[in-house]
């Protein structure tokens, strides 16, 4: 643990490196727990079971909050690592549910099945390794900057990742089995229609989240985090980072959704090649921009990387599903205009940086966005499209 921490964050002093290594030892079993949990979740999704896999993260966070309130005051930050480990173990609750979905175990393995599995999995492993190495390099780049730089970037990235994790990941998970089914029948028309519906939903949720997190970044950060050691200076730094991260929210959402179409078609090599290239460019973008803009260069570089990654994925779709050029804009333009109306509201009207102010900004902005989207007859709000999506 000490060796690994020293390689990843060389800018930390000895005390911080030792503390980080101790936390890493507590968190290490999560490698197994999350691996098993992801497999169980995939089986449940393949059988159109979404409720229990969606409840597990809620239970995870409940356990972590309980440890924060009851254990951390007594034992310090180590209690948070212990709570995170305990929360990860809750993924094993999926075991009995998944067992009921699977046929009886058999010793028979079809000839070549393991070879096919390994061939499909290897590109994904390479892609994930490249992505994680890129993340580690980013932390190394800012580890010797002003104290707290890694923390404010993590806070900002978590806030930007929240709508991606909630909406884009949910849309991708729900549409994945439907895309697999249509592709297995070689039904291009149905595949394209389902892709269109999912793409429209991605833009519908990504655009207002982008506008809100960019224009109300300070409000969000201050209300959620400014207390204790997180002072006004930390709020200003995290809000700036969130602004630039939020610029990449729509491309990040597209990456999550479009990748699922590749996986549904059984093509893991193309996303691997694009992902590895993008991860390398990510490091280059961050390294160059950190030299100019300091810690904000990580957020800027991540947004540029997300845009390049999304464009390359969309261009590469031609080999799987020829997507008409006009489809992208036809799925996005209503959300863009509704988002512009929402942005004008935020530019003209400010609210107090309090919890009621945050709720008011969310409610008012959301109301304007939905009203304009409804006037423009966004398909996501229409009954017919909702029925098609359920189908």
Image (spheres, grey):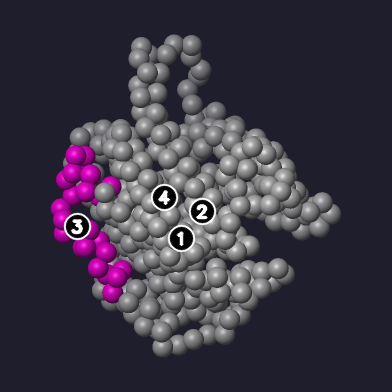
Q: Is residue 25 magenta?
A: no
Q: Residue at x 53, y 85 (%)?
A: 351
Q: Is residue 316 magenta?
A: yes
Closest to the camera, between mark 1 and mark 3, is 1
Name the residue that disc number 1 marks.
290
178 or 308, nearer to the observer: 308
Name the residue that disc number 4 marks.
283
- In magenta, the rendered stretch is 313-337
Earlier residue among tags 1 and 3: 1
Q: CA distance from mark 1 to mark 3?
A: 36 Å
Q: CA distance from mark 4 to mark 2?
A: 10 Å
42 or 295, nearer to the observer: 295
Q: Position of residue 357 (x, y in %)?
A: 56, 81
Q: Quadrant of residue 125?
A: top left
Label 1 close to label 3 by CB (< 8 Å): no
Label 4 close to label 3 by CB (< 8 Å): no
Q: Residue at x 21, y 48 (%)?
A: 315
Name the residue that disc number 2 marks.
141
Image quadrant in which the N terminus is located: top right
Label 2 close to label 1 by CB (< 8 Å): yes
Name the residue that disc number 3 marks.
327
Looking at the image, is 29 positioned above or below residue 75?
above
């Amino acid at each position: 643990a000490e060796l690994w921490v020293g390689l990843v964050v060389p800018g930390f002093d000895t005390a911080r490196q030792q503390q980080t290594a101790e936390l890493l030892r507590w968190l290490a079993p999560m490698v197994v727990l999350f691996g098993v949990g992801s497999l169980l979740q995939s089986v449940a999704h393949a059988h159109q079971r979404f409720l229990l896999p969606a409840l597990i993260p809620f239970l995870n966070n409940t356990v972590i909050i309980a440890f924060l309130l009851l254990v951390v005051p007594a034992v310090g930050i180590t209690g948070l690592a212990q709570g995170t480990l305990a929360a990860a173990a809750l993924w094993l609750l999926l075991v009995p549910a998944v067992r009921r979905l699977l046929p009886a175990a058999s010793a028979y393995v079809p000839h070549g099945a393991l070879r096919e599995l390994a061939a499909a999995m290897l590109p994904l492993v390479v892609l994930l390794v490249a992505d994680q190495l890129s993340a580690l390099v980013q932390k190394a780049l800012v580890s010797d900057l002003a104290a707290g730089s890694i923390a404010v970037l993590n806070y900002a990235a978590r806030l930007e990742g929240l709508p991606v994790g909630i909406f884009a990941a949910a849309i991708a998970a729900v549409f994945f089995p439907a895309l697999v089914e249509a592709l297995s029948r070689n039904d291009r028309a149905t595949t394209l229609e389902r892709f269109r519906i999912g793409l429209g939903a991605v833009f519908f949720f990504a655009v207002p989240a982008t506008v809100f997190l960019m224009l109300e970044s300070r409000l969000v950060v201050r209300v959620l985090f400014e207390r204790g050691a997180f002072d006004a200076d930390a709020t200003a730094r995290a809000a700036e980072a969130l602004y630039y991260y939020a610029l990449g929210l729509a491309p990040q959402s597209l990456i999550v959704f479009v990748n699922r179409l590749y996986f549904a078609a059984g093509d893991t090599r193309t996303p691997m090649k694009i992902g590895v290239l993008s991860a390398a460019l990510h490091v280059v973008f961050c390294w160059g921009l950190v030299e100019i803009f300091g810690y904000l260069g990580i957020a800027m570089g991540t947004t540029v990387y997300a845009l390049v990654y999304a464009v390359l994925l969309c261009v590469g779709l031609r080999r799987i599903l020829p997507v008409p050029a006009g489809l992208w804009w036809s799925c996005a333009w209503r959300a863009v205009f509704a988002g512009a109306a929402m942005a004008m509201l935020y530019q003209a009207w400010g609210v107090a940086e309090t919890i009621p102010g945050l709720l008011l900004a969310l409610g008012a902005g959301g109301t304007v966005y939905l009203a304009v989207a409804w006037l423009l007859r966004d398909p996501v709000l229409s009954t017919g499209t909702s029925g098609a999506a359920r189908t």
